Image (tube, rainbow, N blue to C red):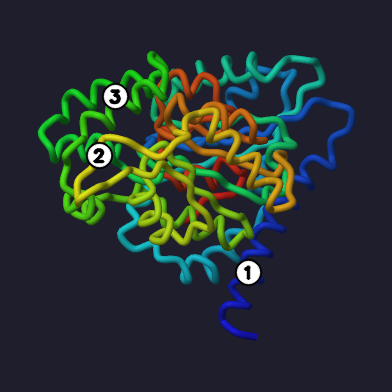
Amino acid sequence: MTAFDKTTNDFYQYNTITKNAWQSALSKIKNNTNFAVIIVTKNTQKNLKDVINKWSQQHPNYQLADIDDYDKSDICLNSSILVNIETQNDRLTENMDIARYLLTTSNHTNIASIKTELIHYLRENLQNNFDCHLLPIDTILQNYKMACFDMDSTLIEQEVIVELAKATGIGEQVNAITEQAMRGEIDFNQSFSQRVRLLEGTSAEVLAEINQNLTLSAGAKTTLSLLNGLGFYTVLISGGFVYFAQYIANKLHINEFHANELLIKNQQVTGDVSLPIIDGAKKAEIVAKIVQQQGVSLEDVICIGDGANDLQMMATAHLGIAYHAKPIVQQQADTAINCTGLEGVIYALGYGKLFD
């Protein structure tokens, strides 16, 4: 057996053990409504599980089963998998505390009501220093096969079009339009065309300079390595530009990428892109097309993004995750990551703490 084969087997064990832990807890419950509760905090002075248990005591109609009592996948992860992942300089969030529970209720309280109660309680005890993933249990038990990521402000920390504008002295103008679009205040296609037009005449050399200065989001390397190892088909779908998307996809070993082609003539940006523009609707179309090509279902897909133009692709997926996103995106996504880097995606999928 080669080292690669062994690692692949360890990923399989890691996934199986984690899923079995959730299933074992669920198997002890019959004829009830069940949810996964995952709380992620950092730098808290309180014992997180004590905080959650106190909340449970205040709600006798809810029952909590601690998933960590069933899950031994961290042994496989820490001993075998992470040593094969480039985690250096990945800026993973330190001093994390994670609690995972199966929440069971015998009445028909809906998920929104439970989440409102729980988040209010957590804010009183943990301030805003937490992520709360409260999801139907099938969301955690699903064997996902495909993960689709936005690029700007998701896989990377920058908005590339803003970086281009800064380099050409029109940063404030472009940034103002970008922020309006990401908040959903103006049509994406309209805003995109306005911004690209402002870039007319930019030297192609500037693109290469910006590429070298792009920074991956914290946790991006670890997250993509784990997802790839777990068998996910990974996709980058960006409303930005192919030139940068290809570079980031190669850097993170992403299987496939889609972005807008920025037109260049005589080594200068023309101010135009190839049509059609990849807007929110087009992102959703791309997800659906890749699903068909890969022979999977939309039920097998997770989508991660931060802007209003990511909402349609996130809505098509079984799980849509907002990453350090605009308020409108956090409100409409299935769940949101604010407390960690991109490794929070792994926690939202029901896996345990990555590092001791």
The one nearer the camera, 226 or 198, is 198
Is label 2 in a helix, a strand or a loop? strand
- Give the Cα distance between marks 3 and 2: 13 Å
| Residue situated furthest front in the rendering | 266
Residue type at the position of mark 2: Thr
Where residue 192 sits, quadrant-wise, is: top left
Residue 350 vs residue 170: left or right? right
x and y percent of residue 49 in the render?
55, 36
| For marks 3 and 2 on the same chain, the one whose residue lies earlier in the sequence | 3
Residue position marked by numbered label 1 in the rendering: 10
Residue position marked by numbered label 2 in the rendering: 270
Residue type at the position of mark 1: Asp
When the figure is inspected, residue 231 is found, relative to residue 328, above or below; the finding is: below
| For marks 1 and 3 on the same chain, the one whose residue lies earlier in the sequence | 1
Give the residue displayed 57% in from the left and 20% down from the top.
118
Q: Which mark is residue 105?
A: none
Is label 3 in a helix, a strand or a loop? helix
- Give the Cα distance between marks 1 and 3: 49 Å
x and y percent of residue 101 in the render?
65, 37
- Give the Cα distance between marks 2 and 1: 50 Å
Residue 90 vs residue 303: left or right? left
| For marks 2 and 1 on the same chain, the one whose residue lies earlier in the sequence | 1
The one nearer the camera, 19 or 222, is 222
Residue position marked by numbered label 3 in the rendering: 194
Q: Nearer the viewer, mark 1 or mark 3?
A: 3
Q: Nearer the viewer, mark 3 or mark 2?
A: 2
Where residue 285 sits, quadrant-wise, is: top right
| Residue situated furthest bottom in the rendering | 1
Quadrant in which the N terminus is drawn: bottom right
x and y percent of residue 20 in the render?
75, 52
When the figure is inspected, residue 197 is found, relative to residue 123, above or below; the finding is: below
